[in-house]
Image (tube, coloured by chain):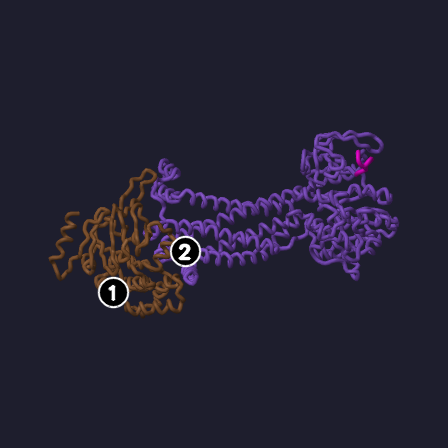
Amino acid sequence: MNAIVRKALADLRTYRFQSAMVAIIVFAATTTLVLALTLQRGADDPWANSFEQANGAHIAFNADLDDDVSEIYELPGVEAVRADVPTLWGTGIVVNGRKHEVVMYGMVDLPEINRPVLTDGRWLDPGDQRGIVLSRSFAKDLEIDVGDSVGVPLAGTVEQFEVVGLAINVNRGPYPNWDVSSTWALPETLFAIDPDAENIHQSIFVRLTDPEATDAFIGRAYAAVPALSQYGTDDWIEARDSVNEWNQLITIFLGVFSLFAFAAVGFVIANVISGRVLAQFREIGLLKAIGFTPRQAALIFLVQNLALALAAGIGGVAAAAIVAPVFLRRTADVMNAGTPDAFYPDLALLALVVVQALAALFTLLPAWRGGRISTAQALTKGFEAPQHRPGLIARIAAAIHLPLVVVMGVKDAFARPMRAGLTVAALTITVLTVTFGLSMEATARKILDEPAMNGNPFDISVEPGELSEAETREILEANDAVAGLHTRGTIRMQVTSADDGVVSFSARVLGGDYQGFPYAISTGRMIAAPGEAVAGIGLFNLLGLDVGDDLNVTVDGRAVPLHIVGRDRE
Amino acid sequence: MSADLVVSGVNLGRTYGGRSGAAAVCALDGVDISVAAGELTAIMGPSGCGKSTLLNILGGLDRPTSGELYLGGRRVDNLSESEWAVLRRNQIGFVFQFFNLIGNLTAAGNIELPALLAGIPSRRARQRATGLLQQLGIADQADKLPSELSGGQRQRVALARALVNEPSLLLADEPTGNLDSGSAADVLDLIRTIHAQGRTIIMVTHDPKVAAIADRLIMMQDGQIISDDVPARPLEPGRLRPVVEAQAEG
């Protein structure tokens, strides 16, 4: 072992440039691998991660403030309940002169159940009456940062509140897909906005011992506490499906990126390390001539390359841990998930083991080959390209009369088909990975920056207030900045479900030139004629719908047949 | 097989190529050779006659494609690469025309390496290396890299490396082939001294002056031994005739 270590150390000292190249490449490969794995884990069911962080409620019931809902605590299947969370509906906050509808939760301390997942800034301070926490997706969309001010309508005036933190509400999808965003303020603020508490209700957050039994539990809860059924219910399945469908694209991106990164790391390490060993075939012969067994000769290279790979790998893991938050934050922004941890010890260990294994494999393979060839041949010829006929590519290069230097270059480059193939594959995969990584970043930016990509097909929405629809339309059409407009109203519809009886839900009604707006429909198409409808995933699940189905709904007691032409994420 | 024989080969053959439609080249053709303990044997012949191939086969650097090889009475042509490596480490020293020193180890480091490999503790290995360097007159070059040494000095280091594990057989392939006449004479003196200490030596050369120091001269041509005799001595011109005749016949 003494001789092996001495020779390995001498090699590392002598081939400093080569060693540095191997170290740099293994460093970069490890960083890429750890980043890819970390991003992949961060994107692995981001909603579930956030839900766990939030100790999320499986069901969020709504009731009037003074309703007694205490019986829900006694229902079988309940793990924990947090009731009496004052919740103000139908209020708005004003950003840059524009009012945005929000739902505002009144909280002092972060609750045990369904706590907002704080991603930036701090939580509310009972001593600071002018602090507010916004939903992160809402803040990102409107480019609001912690420390900025937003307007909150208090007793007829708009008061400025400081945004002290940003958080995620796991019961609701990201803004603007869910266009009523969540905000959190001290309970006093809710009552200052709505002194008569006309629109202040209570949210009742329930965690179940068996989350899969959500539907059945809701039925039992409605029967036991009728007050819970009057304002509808949000459940975790609906929220999860909404978020996850949105995140599918990103998850696929990250999955493919990880796969590419993994392949690239393998090919690059294979090429660099095996090339380093192949270049020293003659030395393997010399070592064998003076008494090294093939295994001992291989061990010299193994010691060198594993030492390099370990040092560079640890450096790569550290670099990934430093760089990862930048990427993770961006990904988390897009996915409306809590920013995952930047360092997972098990992933770091996995990456190190993979890199070491690759380094070992691609050291031992050529060293084993070097050990097998006759010592005399290794001493006299080293690792020479075989002297057989030029390959197909070289023959083609000659046939089309490329310059002689090109033909000779091609002949040399492809003299060993296996090695040439490895090189081509390594370069291809590396370029693919880089391209894919850049595309992913560009796509993420586009999703964040473009309203249409965000599922928000318009730049602004205008509420007529006191004006009639015709007057509003006239004012807008006179404005040169308006490229197009359409109207959107909300009506209540009822539908009969086999399981749940009559179900009431809100439906948007579009008018005007809505076809000129880039509504993004995840499955099927946007409506194009009266009688057609696009339904959200919740309705699809509730009624077992498919695109192409007909649906009979009731509006104000009148039966209205609808033909479902598309499914929306919302 | 007599135990007095350090090495012996029976009907040794070596053919290269012959696969993938390429023409086979016969480098050794039915060679019988026996070298007794303490002999200094020179192998001569024109380029491509198979002398280096024979030396490589005797040292296990190459494998015969036919025949049998014995070392100290033990059959060795069927040994694995690893078994050959251990055999070389302990029983065979090699000296090459182009020295084949390890470029990133000092002179002393080159000499110590086979000793360390043989399990000798590093302090003892260093003592052996120092002793050999003194014996070969290059003690002051111990810490220099091969690139900092002259050709003659390199070959002395190579000789010291070959001798560090006190092998029973020393194989030298054109040991003076890459040296100026002064260095060549020095190296020859050393080989003679080593031989005088009782070492069995087989060397390949194309230089009659080198061959002249041998006890025995084997002439080869076209992969075969064409003569096996006592070499001509420069001081005894009459002895040169058989060699010259043998070459002329070839």
Q: Residue B209: say if magenta.
A: no
What stretch of residues is rendered in magenta? A498-505
Q: Numbered disc 1: what chain?
A: B
Left/right of residue A358 with respect to residue A561 in the rendered view = left
Q: Position of residue A40 (x, y in %)?
A: 61, 48
Of A103 and B135, which appears nearest the observer?
B135
Label 2 CA crowd tier, 10 Å (few <14, some 14–19, many 20+): many
Query: Magenta segment, principal secondary structure?
Result: strand
Chain in purple, by letter, is A
- Give the amino acid type for the residue marked by disc 2 in the picture: Ala
Left/right of residue A416 with respect to residue B24 in the rendered view = right
Q: Position of residue B171 (x, y in %)?
A: 28, 57
Of A238 and A191, which appears nearest the observer?
A238
Q: Is residue A96 visible?
A: no
Q: Numbered disc 2: what chain?
A: A
Element carrying mark 1: helix
Name the mark on residue A96. Answer: none
Name the mark on residue B190. Answer: 1
Label 1 CA crowd tier, 10 Å (few <14, some 14–19, many 20+): some
Measuring 79% from the left and 60% from the top, which residue is drawn there?
A126
Q: Is residue B216 visible?
A: yes
Element carrying mark 2: helix
Chain in brown, by letter, is B
Left/right of residue B111 with respect to residue A86 in the rendered view = left
Q: Position of residue A447 (x, y in %)?
A: 64, 45
Q: Residue A502: say if magenta.
A: yes
Of A368 and A168, which appears nearest the observer?
A368
Marks 1 and 2 close (CB-CB < 8 Å) = no
Which residue has dot 2 on it? A297
- Give the amino acid type for the residue marked by disc 1 in the picture: Leu
Relative vertical location of residue A137 with respect to residue B91 in this rendering, above or below: above
How far, Cα to Cα, is label 1 from label 2? 31 Å
